[in-house]
Amino acid sequence: MDEQHLLRKLQSPESQHLAFEELVRLYQEMLYYHIRRMVIRHDDADDVLQNTFLKAWKYLDKFRGDASLKTWLYRIATNESLTFLKKRKKELHEDVSDLQDDLRHSLKEEGTYFSGEEIQQKLQDAILQLPERQRLVFHMRYYDELKYDEIAEILEVKVGGLKASYHHAVKKIEKQLTLHAG
């Protein structure tokens, strides 16, 4: 089903429930992995994914079609993930470095999600050391393979800044991996 057809079905009260089920089927795996890379833990990712779809359902009537459904859902998932991380940081009374340490610890506990290979573990550890914005941009560009204009629309920022964030993230990851290679 193409996006325009799905959108028409979502806007029709008679077909809205079935169309939303189709929307969930189409995007749940993609969004799950996007969220999981941000929050690390499987259970947390499931909770954030559920909140993402609950919010999408709640605001479905406000979707104007200015962005694609995919972009809209990514924006919701990203915001829900960032809200979750901020809440977790606040609950734990942690500063940013403590939260990053906690995420790295979670990464080791949940190692089966990542291939378990040593280099993959080092890559994920290097990514978790990035500032939040750079980590988010890196994930969306590298793993989700989103175009800069899609990321810009999701994060509501300019493309130039995204390119710079991605470039800095790559350089920091390379530096981190080079340090661990020795």
Image (cartoon, grey):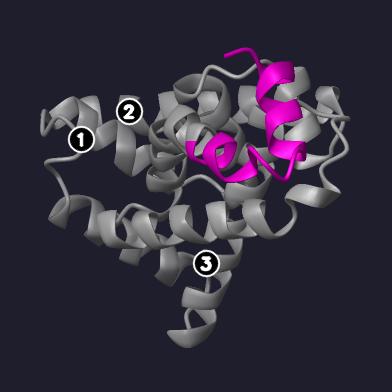
Residue 74: give x, y in percent of width and height.
62, 38
- Relative horizontal placement of residue 82, taking residue 127 as reference (left or right): right
Q: Which residue is mark 3?
A: 84
Between discs 2 and 1, the one toward the N terminus: 1
- Residue located 63% across and 22% down the image: 167
Between discs 1 and 3, the one toward the N terminus: 3
Magenta span of residues: 1-21
- Residue located 33% across and 52% down the image: 40
Question: Which kind of residue does numbered mark 2 sit on?
Answer: Leu
In front: mark 1 or mark 3? 3
- Residue located 29% across and 55% down the image: 104
Q: Which residue is mark 2?
A: 177
Q: Secondary structure beneath disc 3? A: helix
Decide which of 142, 17 is in the foreground and name it: 17
Q: Secondary structure beneath disc 2? A: helix
Res 59 seen here? yes
Residue 3 on the magenta segment: yes
Question: Which kind of residue does numbered mark 1 sit on?
Answer: Phe
100 to 172, vertically: above or below: below
Q: Secondary structure beneath disc 1? A: loop
Q: Which residue is mark 1?
A: 114
96 to 24, vertically: above or below: below
- Location of residue 30 (image quadrant): top left
Question: Which kind of residue does numbered mark 3 sit on?
Answer: Phe
